Image (spheres, grey):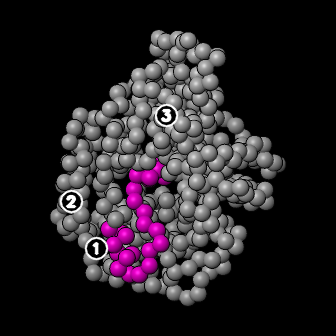
Amino acid sequence: MTDRPVLDLADVGGRDMSVVGPKAARLGELIGAGLPVPDGVVLSVDVHRTALAVAGVAEQVAAGVAELIERVGGAGDLDQRVAALREVAGRAEMSVGHRSALLAAYSSLVSGDADAGGIGPAVAVRSSAIGEDTEDASFAGMYDSVTDVVGADAVLAAVGVCWSSSVSTRSIAYRAGMARQPSGASDPAMAVIVQRMAPSQRSGVMFTVDPRAAVDRLVIEAVGAGGSVVSGGSDPERFEVDRTSGIIVDATRPSGDGDPSATSAPVLSHAEVAALNELGRSIEDHFGTPQDVEWTIGSDGSIWIVQSRPITGRPATAPGSATPGSGGSIPMSGGAPTRDDPDAVLTGTGASAGTARGPARVLRSPGDAPDLLDGEVLVAPATSPEWLPALMRAAAVVTDTGGMASHAAIVARERRIPCVVGVAGATERLVDGEVVTVDGSAGTVSRSTRS
């Protein structure tokens, strides 16, 4: 590997993960395989390490992150302590030489006419941390990215945003909640991708196998312009596809009730589903393991791949067979739901397999996380990375909106707890303290009430 501070994305691959991070390495692999990935460059992790070292804060920040990971559960002032450590980490500044190298690479990247597929001059500046997007940990949404960046000053500022996000309450809570710490868990240094923005009239995620169970189906979730399946703020259009034949086995569209992303026309055509299926199979064949792939489609119909990582948290056994704390059942006393109560069983999309039973706790915002007690069922409109402290204590998760690629679903699968998303009105229909049974395989939430 080279000691250059900035590398072309097309020149990196799996051998370079320790230098550019797994996200950048995998995108480089896909470019090399001839797959449709926007061009980009990577600012190596050593540039950030050098900046921290020159500022004299590298050891202090690393030690501070390690300490907070160890004490996150008992640190009532976690936000304040993280903010103080983040201020220390923010003293790191890129050297003049590294800055010049990055801006020269950026200028070369965006010079010339727009590419086929509608790519223009804007870039996305994205984190590529060493422990991110691995087989054990996705770090989904833990680090910041900045999109639609134009101009040298804006690029430099966006790199600073990415670097700063390496020290955050959400990333520290995520690491602390993992059964096994990823390699370099306390290393705050981060590589950064500067990549031409793919046009996004429609976007989504596909899992090259069903992330919930051992079913040989590819799953695609899609939203229209301005939407995001990862945010969980809306219900996506979903296709389940037989991987071999390409036949659509099941298709689900949002009802539109209270969902501004729902439209009268389907988001994807059957031809586009077939094209995504072929791309997904090619990506899985390249890496040799099931993949979680983020894609986007421009106004001219061109498909672009913007991320690929191993599927995390997929159960190795049949749904419902896991032990408590791993997507299994948690026995508690309580009556069976009545059959004549229309709200006795709420339905949504099963997003993480297994069953759990416990008191419901309805939370409206991440700031309510301290109200959730260990073993309670988190009921929320949707979740974002700021919800991590609550998600790490929940016995199960239920959300009003979202799909299998939403933040709540990804974290629930990694934690091996049941999750049901897209349960319309769950935060209004469920009551604090009532015992519910969450079946993440069937996609149901049963209320333990009697007439």
The quadrant the C terminus occupies is: top right
Q: Disc 3 to disc 2, how far (Cα)? A: 40 Å
223 and 62: which is toward the camera: 223
Q: Which residues are magenta?
A: 131-160
Q: Is residue 319 above or below residue 67?
A: above
- Looking at the rendered image, the disc whose residue lies closer to the viewer, 1 or 3, is 3
Tell me the element at label 3: helix
Q: Is residue 250 toward the left or the right of residue 148 in the image?
A: right
Query: In terms of secondary structure, where does tag 1 sit?
Result: loop
What number is the disc on residue 159? Answer: none
Camera-side residue of 101 and 358:
358
Mark 1 or mark 2: which comes first in sequence? 2
Q: Which residue is mark 1?
A: 94
Q: Is residue 180 magenta?
A: no
Q: Which residue is mark 3?
A: 428
For marks 1 and 2, give the CA distance.
Answer: 16 Å
Of pointers 3 and 2, the one earlier in the residue sequence? 2
- Residue 133 is left or right of residue 211, and the answer is left
Q: Which mark is residue 87?
A: 2
Seen at 29% across and 42% down, the residue is: 69
* Rendered residue at 56%/27% (across/down): 445
- Three-letter code for the amino acid on which mark 2 is drawn: Glu
Question: Residue 113's x, y, as percent?
Answer: 59, 87
Q: Residue at x 44, y 52 (%)?
A: 141
Q: Find numbered disc 2 in the image and state the secondary structure of the residue it sits on.
A: helix
